[in-house]
Amino acid sequence: MSAERVPTRDDGEAGLDERARRVLAFEGRAWQQAGLKAEAIRDEFGISAARYYRILGELIDSPAALRHDPMLVKRLQRMREARAATRARRSLSIGRPLD
């Protein structure tokens, strides 16, 4: 089983493993500087920031994470959607001729 996947409990109910709970708790902290957060990710989890964000992206799509901390997960989903919308608007404007 991959550490990036949310495991299923024996009773059939999807739950979060220890790493997933740690990622959500870590993400719930307030970070003022991205550089400090990237360093803390490496110290706390022993992985790169890019891998951490892939794990987080999968995690916030899981129903178990939503049950565990609904306010945090919904906030993270809204932030992800806002970034995607910004990227879409930016990529649409690239094709326009300059006036």
Image: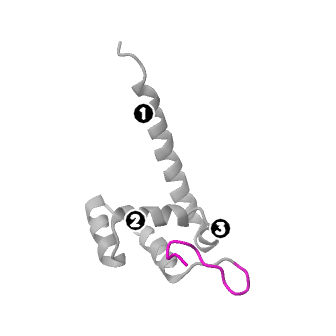
Q: Nearer the viewer, residue 95 or 99?
A: 95
Q: Residues within 10 Å of mark 1 (few under 14, many from 20)?
A: few
Magenta region: 1-13
Outermost residue to the top: 99
Q: Would you name the residue on which mark 3 appears? A: 63
What kind of element bears circle 3? helix
Whichever of labels 1 and 3 marks the residue nearer the N terminus, that label is 3
Residue at figure coordinates x 42%, y 33% from the top left: 90
Q: Secondary structure at mark 2?
A: helix
Color scheme of the displayed model: one colour
State the mark number for residue 65.
Answer: none
**Does residue 80 appear in this view?**
yes
| In contact (CB < 8 Å): disc 2 and disc 1 | no
Residue 16 position in % (x across, y down): 58, 78
Q: The N terminus appears in which quarter of the rendering?
A: bottom right
Q: Which residue is mark 1?
A: 90
Residue farthest toward the front in the current orientation of the protein = 1
Q: Position of residue 50 (x, y in %)?
A: 37, 61
Q: Return the x and y of residue 3 as percentages of the image width and height.
A: 49, 76
Label 2 Cα neighbours within 10 Å, binned few <14 / some 14-19 / many ≥20: few
Lateral position of residue 3 relative to residue 11, left or right: left
Q: Quadrant of residue 26?
A: bottom left
Instruction: Report, in whole angstroms, how far the alpha carbon at label 1 lies from the one at label 3.
Output: 31 Å
Is residue 19 covered in magenta?
A: no
Q: Residues within 10 Å of mark 3 (few under 14, many from 20)?
A: some
From the image, tell me which residue sits under label 2.
Answer: 51
Q: Pick whichever of labels 2 and 1 is earlier in the sequence.
A: 2
